[in-house]
């Protein structure tokens, strides 16, 4: 009996949806989406707009009670400043080397090797490489400061001294080397996971065919595997460029932009220092926000481009069945 | 893939290469553990076993809040972030997976864009948002920021889990007049328990390890988390007391290590799942 009434009700609904039903078709999704929408509004949308707004003012510790709209003056200052060149160069060094050597290079090497040795051993190594990613950044930085510390502590010196290399504090002597390596050893796992699943997805027939044709392992990698995973490689390159461009946490913890004057200060760290840290005694919110706004704009454009290039439209397809 | 692998010797060589590449990391983690229990460590060689590095557990640190208070803060932070994130993400993920509503497509694209967007760039503006809301230097404020920034990834992962559940049970519940909310709570959620567990672990670990947000958005002692404490210790003890530093670090890392050891496959899956969604 109950079933009959339900059927009858549904028939009635289909003929003429009541205003209550129509209201519910809106309020129910709103209820489910609402909380997320609110958080996104407060902590993504408003901050994006606010970054740009603050960047158009002269807000700083000195002018906090009397904030003036200054138009594009902060951007002009970035353009004119000599420091900008230095920061830009640093950012290129940081992003370029970390990306090529580790996030793509090391990731490719690891995923190729771990798919060519027994699966269990390979998985163990891949899992191990995830450990830096879940290690709290503060601890990770401590491990690197020890690793590169001056004698008698650091392991690098202990390892190099038989070769006649004078012990030194490597973080001070070669800050870039350490900064890039420390970031790289964390960043590698992202590409490694993606490349590995892409390699696993290659049909075995292709690989067998190469074997039958007498290809060596290296030839097979060069002519079969690499061409087949070029799309994932492109994805990792673009995605990681953006996240490296914005990241500064490990640099902050390792060198804080030093040693000395802006030696390892990258764009995002520079913005942070200017706007939020008392390092210079005079916190310049407006100037810092302008630096950040440039990154925000790059970020917005780049992530929208991903959406187009990587065919996300297929993933946002409508649900197959729909009930009220 | 095993069948196409080359000779045995070749495999051993490959194994050695990957071991060598992993060596720096291996050495660092070994050092972290042994240094925490040694008087002093030269390179990787420990000198003299001791527990005195752990004295902070009963003596505390000079000029710092009690270690238990800090641990409690960190725990509250991680648990609440994870709870909010999983709860909201499973609400939203359900709606995106199962409902038709105006703006659905846009919202889904938005989730993906935000997932790719580097949220660190917003730290300066979020500082003002917190000031205006009166949430600067409160744990509540940092918790909300953290939950919000992690939300796009969470929503995406949750949607994936809902997509994999068949419609049959849910359909009959809906036809029987069960409300959407009850269907979600009583039928869907129990079915994606593994997914909820995975995202909870992920969110908890990420909250537990968080450094930048509490470091920037809190300043008083009573809001210290373990990461902020360690940062202060590094400043105070730089190149002096590695024993104390590593003991504190190991103490801080305990939950991370436990999860790592016991949920390895889970972890690999969720990282693969979280990134795969955006590649394939």
Image: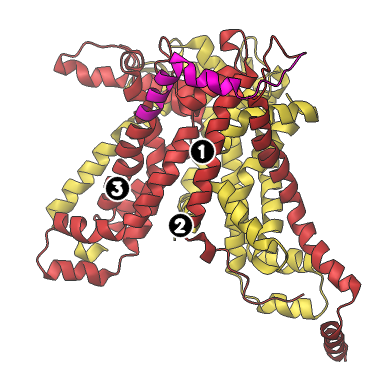
Chain colours: A red, B yellow
**Gap between marks 1 and 3 measured at Cα:** 27 Å
x 75%, y 63%: residue: B185
Give percent across and percent down for residue A62: 69, 9
Tag nearer the camera, 2 or 3 = 2
Q: Chain of mark 2?
A: A
Indicate whether B200 appears above or below B244. Answer: below
Q: Tell me, yes or no, whether dots 2 and 3 are on the same chain.
A: yes
x 83%, y 84%: residue: A10
Mark 3 lies on residue: A108
Give percent across and percent down for residue A174: 31, 18
Circle 3: is it few (<14), some (14-19), or many (20+) Cα within 10 Å?
Answer: many
Q: Quadrant of residue B128?
A: top right
Q: State the extent of the magenta-drawn residues as a range.
A: A66-93
Mark 2 lies on residue: A310
Q: Pick whichever of labels 2 and 3 is earlier in the sequence.
A: 3
Q: Nearer the viewer, residue A209 or B206?
A: A209
Q: Quadrant of the N terminus of chain B?
A: bottom left
Q: Which mark is residue A298?
A: 1
Q: Is residue A77 magenta?
A: yes
């Amino acid at each position: 009996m109950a079933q009959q009434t339900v059927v009858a009700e549904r028939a009635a609904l289909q003929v003429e949806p009541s205003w209550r039903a129509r209201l519910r078709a809106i309020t129910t999704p709103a209820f489910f989406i609402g909380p997320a929408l609110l958080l996104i509004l407060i902590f993504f949308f408003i901050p994006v707009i606010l970054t740009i707004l603050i960047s158009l003012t002269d807000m700083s510790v000195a002018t906090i009670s009397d904030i003036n709209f200054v138009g594009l003056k902060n951007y002009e200052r970035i353009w004119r400043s000599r420091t900008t060149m230095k920061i830009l160069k640093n950012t290129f060094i940081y992003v370029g080397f970390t990306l090529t050597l580790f996030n793509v290079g090391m990731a490719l090497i690891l995923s190729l090797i771990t798919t060519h040795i027994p699966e269990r051993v390979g998985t163990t190594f891949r899992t191990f490489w995830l450990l830096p990613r879940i290690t709290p950044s503060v601890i990770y930085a401590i491990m690197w400061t020890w690793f590169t510390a001056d004698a008698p502590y650091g392991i690098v010196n202990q390892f190099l001294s038989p070769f006649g290399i004078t012990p030194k504090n490597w973080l001070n002597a070669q800050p870039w080397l350490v900064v890039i390596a420390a970031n790289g050893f964390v960043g590698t796992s992202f590409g490694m996971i993606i490349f590995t699943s892409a390699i696993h997805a290659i049909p075995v027939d292709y690989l067998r065919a190469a074997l039958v044709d007498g290809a060596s392992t290296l030839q097979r990698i060069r002519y079969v595997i690499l061409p087949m995973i070029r799309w994932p490689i492109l994805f990792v390159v673009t995605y990681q460029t953006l996240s490296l461009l914005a990241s500064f946490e490990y640099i902050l913890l390792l060198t804080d932009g030093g040693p000395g004057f802006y030696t390892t200060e990258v764009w995002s760290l520079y913005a942070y220092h200017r706007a939020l840290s008392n390092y210079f005694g005079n916190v310049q919110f407006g100037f810092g926000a302008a630096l950040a706004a440039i990154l925000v704009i790059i970020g917005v454009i780049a992530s929208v481009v991903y959406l187009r290039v990587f065919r996300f439209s297929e993933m946002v397809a409508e649900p197959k069945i729909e009930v009220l | 893939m095993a069948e196409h692998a080359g000779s045995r010797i070749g495999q051993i060589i490959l194994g050695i290469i990957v071991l060598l590449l992993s060596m720096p990391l291996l050495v660092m983690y070994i050092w972290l553990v042994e240094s925490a229990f040694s008087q002093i460590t030269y390179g990787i060689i420990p000198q003299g076993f001791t527990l005195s590095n752990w004295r902070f557990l009963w003596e505390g640190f000079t000029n710092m809040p009690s270690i238990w208070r800090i641990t409690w803060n960190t725990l509250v932070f991680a648990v609440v972030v994870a709870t909010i994130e999983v709860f909201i993400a499973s609400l939203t993920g359900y709606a995106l997976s199962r409902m038709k509503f105006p703006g659905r497509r846009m919202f889904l694209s938005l989730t993906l864009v935000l997932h790719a967007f580097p949220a660190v760039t917003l730290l300066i503006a979020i500082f003002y948002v917190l000031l205006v809301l009166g949430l600067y230097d409160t744990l509540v404020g940092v918790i909300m920021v953290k939950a919000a920034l992690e939300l796009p990834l969470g929503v995406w992962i949750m949607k994936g889990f809902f997509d994999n559940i068949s419609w049959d049970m849910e359909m009959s519940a809906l036809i029987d007049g069960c409300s959407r909310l009850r269907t979600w709570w009583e039928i869907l959620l129990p079915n994606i328990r593994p997914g909820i567990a995975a995202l909870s672990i992920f969110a908890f670990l990420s909250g537990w390890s968080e450094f930048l947000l509490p470091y920037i958005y809190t300043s008083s002692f009573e809001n210290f988390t373990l990461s902020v404490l360690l940062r202060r210790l590094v400043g105070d003890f730089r190149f002096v007391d590695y024993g104390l530093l590593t003991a504190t670090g190991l103490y801080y890392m305990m939950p991370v290590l436990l999860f790592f050891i016991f949920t390895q496959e889970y972890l690999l899956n969720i990282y693969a799942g979280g990134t795969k969604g955006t590649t394939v």
